[in-house]
């Protein structure tokens, strides 16, 4: 589903850039389905910015990206002060007007909604949407199928194995008594 959303967003962006260059009017609608991995805040024909993932926790790694209004843009900057990051963070250019930078959110960032600004050297700008959620007060519940567990050699595994062994022995004795009672 993510792939379909990204393809649709790419087509929307390409059509928006093409229609802006051709001077066509675009009907404004949702750029991506609700719950998409990245959310953009922009107008057709202007820069478009995203934060991936758009929901994160303190200490998470986030990639901010901006597609400038023209391919002639030579640089872009992320303004990170709202996130507790340096004021101006230079972004990497992929050569076609798309700039990105990956940052790690500070561990002490407050939970809430953030809209960090990004500027392009061609004069266009956009804001990305980022929602920061807090950590649970007591830490997460110990769940999962074992592949995500970080704790090893705890006593519960030994108790579980002992219970399996006792059950196997009791089952074997029960089966043996049943066979002996049939023979008599």
Image (cartoon, rainbow, N blue to C red):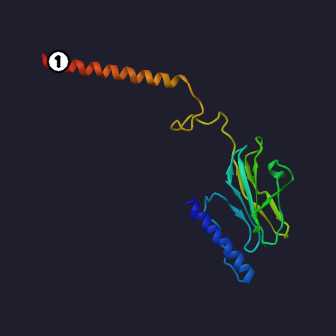
Residue that sits furthest to the bottom in the current view? 23
How far from the left and from the top, in percent, is residue 91? 80, 58
How far from the left and from the top, in percent, is residue 152? 57, 28
What residue appears at the point 15 percent right and 20 percent down from the top-left corner? 182
Residue 126, compared with residue 106, is above or below; it is: below
How far from the left and from the top, in percent, is residue 148? 57, 38
On the image, numbered disc 1 is attached to which residue? 181
Label 1 packing within 10 angstroms: few (<14), some (14-19), many (20+): few
Query: Which SS class for mark 1?
Result: helix
- Residue 78: which quarter of the image? bottom right
Quadrant of image for the N terminus: bottom right
| Foreground of the two, 166 or 113 | 166
In the rendered view, does 72 fall on the left or right side of 172? right
Residue that sits furthest to the top in the current view? 184
| Foreground of the two, 141 or 3 | 3
Whether residue 30 is visible:
no
Whether residue 176 is visible:
yes
Q: In this figure, what is the number of numbered marks?
A: 1
- Residue 153: which quarter of the image? top right
How far from the left and from the top, in percent, is residue 131? 70, 52
Residue that sits furthest to the front in the current view? 95
Quadrant of image for the C terminus: top left
Residue 113, compared with residue 6, is above or below; it is: above
What residue appears at the point 17 percent right and 18 percent down from the top-left corner? 181
């Amino acid at each position: 589903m993510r792939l379909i959303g990204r393809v649709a967003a790419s087509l929307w962006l390409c059509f928006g850039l093409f229609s802006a260059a051709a001077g066509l009017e675009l009907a404004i609608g949702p750029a991506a389905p609700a719950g998409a991995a990245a959310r953009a805040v922009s107008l057709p024909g202007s820069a478009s910015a995203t934060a991936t993932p758009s929901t994160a926790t303190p200490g998470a790694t986030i990639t901010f990206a901006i597609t400038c209004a023209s391919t002639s843009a030579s640089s872009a900057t992320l303004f990170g002060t709202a996130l507790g990051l340096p004021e101006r963070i230079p972004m990497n250019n992929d050569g076609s007007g798309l700039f990105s930078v990956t940052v790690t959110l500070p561990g002490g960032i407050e939970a809430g909604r953030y809209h960090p600004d990004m500027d392009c050297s061609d004069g266009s700008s956009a804001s990305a949407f980022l929602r920061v959620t807090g950590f649970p007060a007591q830490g997460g519940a110990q769940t999962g199928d074992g592949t995500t567990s970080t704790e090893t050699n705890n006593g519960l595994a030994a108790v579980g194995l002992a219970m399996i062994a006792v059950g196997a022995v009791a089952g074997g004795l029960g089966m043996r008594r049943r066979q002996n009672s049939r023979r008599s």
